[in-house]
Amino acid sequence: MDIVVLCKFVPDLVEDLEIDASTHLLDRNFLRLMPNELDDHALEEALLLKERHGGTVTVVTVDAGDVDEALYTAAAKGADRVVKIVGEGLDQGLSSQRLAALFAQAAGEWPHDLILTGTQAVDDLDGFAGALVAARLGMPYVGYVTKVASENGAVVARKEYPGGLNADIEIVGQAVLGIQSAEKPPRYVVTSKVMAAMKSVTIEEFEAGDAQADLELPITGMAVPQSAAHAEMIVGSVTEVAEKLAKLLRERGLVA
Amino acid sequence: MSVATSYEFLDKVIHATPDGEEIRKCLQCGTCSGVCPYGFAMEYPPRSLIAALRADDFHGVLESDTIWLCVSCFACASVCPVKIPLTRGLLATLKTEMLVGGSIPQELQTALGNSRRYGNSLGESPRKRADWTKDFTVPVPVLAAHKKPVDVLWFVGDYGSYHPRVQQVTRALAKLLFVLDVKFGILGAEENSDGDTQAFTGEWGLFELLARKNTQAMLKYQFAEILTADPHAFNALKHEYPRLGLDRPVKHYAQFLTEHFERLRPLLQNRGPQRVTYHDPCYLGRANDNNLYEEPRQLLRAIPGLDLVEMSHNRALSICCGGGGGGMWLDGFSWEKAHARTTEWRVKEALAAGAQVLAVACPYETPRFEDAVKSTGNEGKLKVKDIVELLVEAVFG
Ligand code: SF4
Ligand code: SF4
């Protein structure tokens, strides 16, 4: 099975985020970028599939932040090819629409029975990117996937629904899968292997070209969320705390 | 690639340290396993590990994950009658094999990932490394802005920079340097984790990455010597960094302050707590024969009214706080495997010695022992203080 994994860089929340008043966007001077955590899960799931069923894993990312190191790390973990999409202004923050346009254009260039990506990102909580890539490529999309299995030639994706429900969805033909979590936590690769990859692996480049978003909504404002209510601290002796807690749970209808 | 056989692995162990060949002389006496604080819970404490290798059962060794209980405390290495470099050689090399094979507890993975991404194991913003100096009465020059030579480059370390409790110790040391009129500076955002503990989890590649960054940053500036409050940083800067080009003397504050003892002593005017015991950190004592046992005690005894009492395990027999070798980042794992905390044993020893204060000299120790005072139900009965905090109290009241 040949798999393309789409990875992007997102703002690292370890730094304070500032809003640029003139553009209504994040002030990119102080931004630190990091690989999207769920894309790491997508890569892990792809590597697990490769280990079980053979095939290839190609990692595609957009040139923003420390992508080279992320790509060498992916190669050290077992990815066969690593690709970066290069072009003007790609590090200035992309909408999910534009990102999907770039990814869709690039992904088609490498063998892909499946395309895996993180189902969400800190800058895409609605999880549009994967679905938009699928739409552009005319493929089905399954999001919130926690397991991918290949049985008798058919791919089955386990999709998680709210309320603890799961569905096993059988996929015919190529598909894009939004990974919520890999079956195992993403693997650690020792630094010496990453260093070795830096010497032996070539990062392929893909010109961004003129892929445009279908729809680019202007952003008219951006604000830091204000905390409305604070947590209530329940104090007192153990018995008092337990009584108050039980009363609260009953009042809120959480227990009968 | 992971090595396949016991012999290939042994070859790596032998080449990991200068005296690696000594492992062939193992008597199977078991002293190492006996003294190991977690030996009771390890499937392969050092003696059994060597026996398994001799029986060519490396496969079995790799199946077990209890090597992650090893806190790289050097207790085994220091008692071995044939002086096999167990901690730095055998155990750290096995950890490397575990890492390469992907057998790594999640919490350790997080700390190593943080170290690689942010240059500190806590996952804090590298830009905020010197934030502890803000709103602080003592001027702490950051070398990049200072632009003047200093006598002392103070390597603050991860926990000293970021951990709220250990920041108090860091500020105390700054006050002492100030009253002693030491011309010092810090690297601030240019400083990275010293990498020592990462190395002892087997991640030597990460150690080299961090150590190179630190060495390059340090060598940009003019200074005569390096000071640190962190025994792990001390150990790495002294024994590992020279091969990366660092050529300045390195001192833990226990050494540095005893060298300035004649100027420090008259400043110690206020009476200290009556009965104090001292916990010897592994990396000031046993590790690499650093043997800094008397300097910390000399500083404590100089505090007026202070009576220094000893715990049953002291000096080279000190029991690790459990933070070394990655233990700092494996508390959940260790508890699950061993259901024991070495810090709790130490708190009980300190109380048995009649101490009111447990004095420490390592940034891992203040938070770890304070937790243990609480978890053993001894809150209010024993305080945990770094030596520099006790000295500051004696100077300023
Ligand atoms: S203490 Fe030394 S000689 Fe004795 S069993 Fe351990 S490694 Fe072998
Ligand atoms: S270094 Fe310490 S914890 Fe590790 S095996 Fe030796 S005695 Fe045990």
Image (cartoon, rainbow, N blue to C red):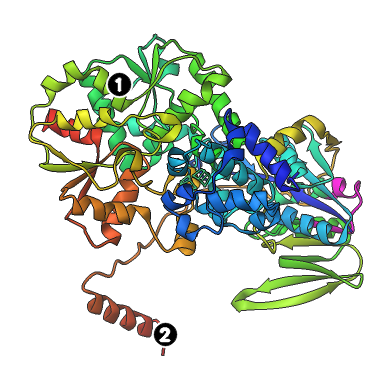
Residue at image position (50%, 46%) is B326
- Density class for disc 2 (Cα within 10 Å; few <14, some 14-19, many ≥20) is few
B72 relative to B253 in the view: left or right: right
Residue nearest the observer in this picture, B35 or A164: B35
Q: What is the spatial separation of the Cα atoms under label 2 and label 1, in whole angstroms?
A: 63 Å
Residue at image position (64%, 35%) is B14
Residue ranking furthest to the bottom: A256
Residue B250 among those drawn in magenta: no
- Residue B323's label in the rendered image is none
The residue labelled by disc 2 is A253
The N terminus of chain A: image quadrant: bottom right
Asked if one can make out residue B394 in the rendered structure from this viewpoint, the answer is yes
Disc 2 is attached to a residue of which chain? Answer: A
Residue at image position (36%, 30%) is B291
SS at badge 2: loop
- Amino acid carrying label 1: it is Phe
- Residue A124, percent across and down? 65, 54
The residue labelled by disc 1 is B256
Displayed quadrant of residue A121: bottom right
Displayed quadrant of residue A193: top right
Residue at image position (34%, 52%) is B343
Give the magenta-colored segment's residue range.
A104-116
Nearest to the eye among marks 2 and 1: give it: 1
Asked if one can make out residue B177 in the rendered structure from this viewpoint, the answer is no
Residue nearest the observer in this picture, B96 or B374: B96
- Amino acid carrying label 2: it is Gly
Disc 1 is attached to a residue of which chain? Answer: B
